[in-house]
Image (tube, rainbow, N blue to C red):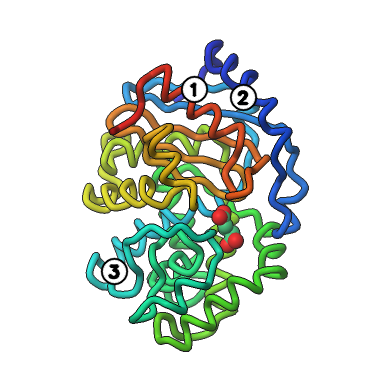
Amino acid sequence: MTCRSNESLSKLVEEARPYAASGRVADYIPALGRAEKDDLSVAIFDIGNECYYAGDYKKKFTLQSISKVLALALALSDRGFDYVFSHVGMEPTGDPFNSISKLETSVPSKPLNPMINAGALAVTHMINGRDNKEKIDRIIRFVSSFLDGAPVTCNWETAQSEMETADLNRALCYFMKQHGIIEGDVEDLLRVYTAQCAIEMNCFDLARVGAVLALNGVDPETGKQIIAENVARICKTFMVTCGMYNASGEFAIKIGIPAKSGVSGGIMGAVPGRYGIGIFGPSLDEKGNSIAGMKILEMLAREQQLSIF
Ligand code: GLU
């Protein structure tokens, strides 16, 4: 499908762009620190089979935490509901995404949900595959299935950059290994996880992935069932309760759509039965969400009454 430039969407982008000035790009992963702060693009994949964009919609960015939704979908398909949720919880947390504190205090020790780093690492650990390469290949192929088989790439430089600075994630892994939530080599798990986070796409592709979720796992163009309806439902529920870090409650009130953001500045939205939304704006607020991206969603939600509540 071709995506067309849209004038009213471009106006929203220009209205939202100045907000980026008050944020910062993530630089704890050094490769992300090179992003242009006021980049802003958006694509909307209408389930009725139209697509609109504004801004530089072909610019690629890495998924980072957005990949956690897809990894969860794959782990659920590989291992089933009971296995996955015996290792990771379903409850939101008011803590930052990389916090270790709740791991220590929850009994039995189990990450609170699959959208925080500890939970996401545990989920990636569950993905089937004989070795790192097979696991990474399976994740990439799985993501590509949301794009009707279009090639999906991983930004290896960003993955390596994260490997070099992932000590907090290492700490989470060692803690979980000690408590029997994961087993095996921590560096291996981090290699798969950082590759998964470094999968890159543009906001049009991201909108298409969101559209599959919005349509309960069905590809809006081909009609193919990409993931089970129940898996899509679980993913969207986590997007609502934990998708926007510890701003998920405020986001649900102000915007009210299933969405997942990543520290690269991406946001994927899935408006049930209507739209998949892909946004890229790398300037982040203190909780790690794209400032201008949230502004666009806020304006869109108001204009088009997108809230599911
Ligand atoms: N790869 C990043 C990390 O683990 C993802 C974090 C995010 O996007 O929230 O720190």
Name the amino acid type tagged 2: Ala
Relative image position of residue 27 (x, y in whole percent): 73, 54
Contact? badges 1 and 2 (CB < 8 Å): yes
SS for dot 1: helix
Relative image position of residue 256 (x, y in whole percent): 37, 35
* Ligand 1 within 8 Å, label 2 CB: no
Question: Sequence-wise, which precedes: disc 1 or disc 3?
Answer: 3
* Ligand 1 within 8 Å, label 3 CB: no
Residue located farthest toward the bottom when viewing the structure as drawn: 178
Q: Is residue 289 left or right of residue 37?
A: left
Q: Residues within 10 Å of mark 2 (few under 14, many from 20)?
A: many
SS for dot 3: helix
Q: Which residue is mark 1?
A: 299
Quadrant containing the N terminus is: top left
Q: Which residue is mark 2?
A: 16
Q: Is residue 76 left or right of residue 255?
A: left
SS for dot 2: helix
Location of residue 40 (image quadrant): top right
- Report how many numbered discs are placed on residues in the image: 3
Q: Give the CA distance from mark 3 to mark 2.
A: 38 Å
Name the amino acid type tagged 3: Phe
Quadrant containing the C terminus is: top left
Q: Which residue is mark 3?
A: 85
